[in-house]
Image (spheres, helix red, strand yellow):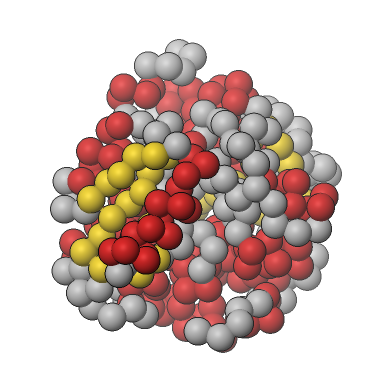
Amino acid sequence: MGEVSADTVTLELLREAKETVSSSPLGVINTPMIPWCQTTLPLDIHCNVHIKLENMQRTGSFKIRGVANQFARRPKGGHFVTMSAGNYGKSFAYASKHYGSKGKVVMPETAPVSRSTLIQSFGVEVERVPTSCLMNVVNRCVQEGDMTFLHSYDDLDLIAGHASLGLEVLEVIPEPDVVVVCCGGGGLLAGVAAAIKLSGCDKTRIYGVEPDGACTMYRSFIEKKPVGMDTESIASGLAPPFAGTLPFELCQRYVEGIVLVNDEEIKAAVSIFYRSGLVVEPSGCAAFAAIINDKIPELEGKNVVCILSGGNIGKDELVNFPG
């Protein structure tokens, strides 16, 4: 693949990827998007929020979208390596089993053990290492093990697959005023933002939300280049060691701004959902936490879309959240 930049990402490319994702043998679903007022969420907000339930997606998160597009465009039976704190790894393992390819997931030591056990159950190897060593181990696997690296957020096919979520949003609300998306490496935010802006929604404001202890994209916006940092957050899925290059370019072009939430706000959001009958993991709650803590400007009276990006949280983790 030649040099990839934000200019490579066209509406035609994204629509083609959406077809690939929709017809994928991995069974990706068009997840429900429901108005806040039709839930038991007890909150006093002055805008029309719609929540997109990617926590109900196949393998429990939006990641399967990008994976479906990546695997559809790679040779069957390959030997792939990736790095993931859990959700991408789970979708990667699920796809590896389906496509009969060999796989290895390099995971940060901070990720819950239940996630590595689950990934191994699909027949994929897991190696747990300190977060700062993730890329070193991936590079070793590529050089010594002759594996192909599938990036969990900085990859054109992946971002185009994630964009299918943005196109689905527009099928329900053709011109949302505001869209709020969690951001880790930036693959989901970049895909959703590109899909919405390239579809002609020039006035839609799109915000990314990061944990304050893992704010690589926020810092990248300030420094005007992708940066890395030592990340730490309860939302491990939003804490990769660096922001993606292509996601950064796309976010700079299409995203209004990045806002930060803290771990306590994320924990409270998990508990609010749980009490209302929705299981959403910390990483999947960031956008919601930003809305209810007034981090997003000028929402009053607006049509707002909030992406709940995943629901992979074990019973062992839930005990750590306020009741």
The correct choice, above or below, for 123 with respect to 170 in the image is: above
Q: Can the viewer see residue 207?
A: no
Residue farthest toward the top in the current orientation of the protein: 323
In the rendered structure, the answer to whether residue 143 lies left or right of residue 79 reads right
In the rendered structure, the answer to whether residue 316 lies left or right of residue 190 reads left
Please state the horizontal and vertical placement of residue 101, each as a whole percent of the image. Answer: 21, 68
Please state the horizontal and vertical placement of residue 151, each as a whole percent of the image. Answer: 45, 62
The correct choice, above or below, for 228 with respect to 291 in the image is: below
In the rendered structure, the answer to whether residue 309 lies left or right of residue 297 reads left
Instruction: In this rendered view, identify the residue nearer to me: 159 or 123.
Output: 123
Please state the horizontal and vertical placement of residue 139, each as a whole percent of the image. Answer: 42, 60
Q: Quadrant of residue 92?
A: bottom left
- At x 30%, y 38%, the residue is 115
- At x 49%, y 64%, the residue is 162
The correct choice, above or below, for 141 with respect to 1 in the image is: above
Quadrant assignment for the C terminus: top left
Q: Can the viewer see residue 198?
A: yes
Residue farthest toward the front in the current orientation of the protein: 144
Please state the horizontal and vertical placement of residue 53, each as a whole percent of the image. Answer: 45, 48
- At x 39%, y 72%, the residue is 70
- At x 57%, y 45%, the residue is 241
In the rendered structure, the answer to whether residue 195 lies left or right of residue 249 reads left
The correct choice, above or below, for 183 with respect to 316 in the image is: below
Instruction: In this rendered view, identify the residue nearer to me: 108 or 309.
Output: 108
Number of marks present in the image shown: 0
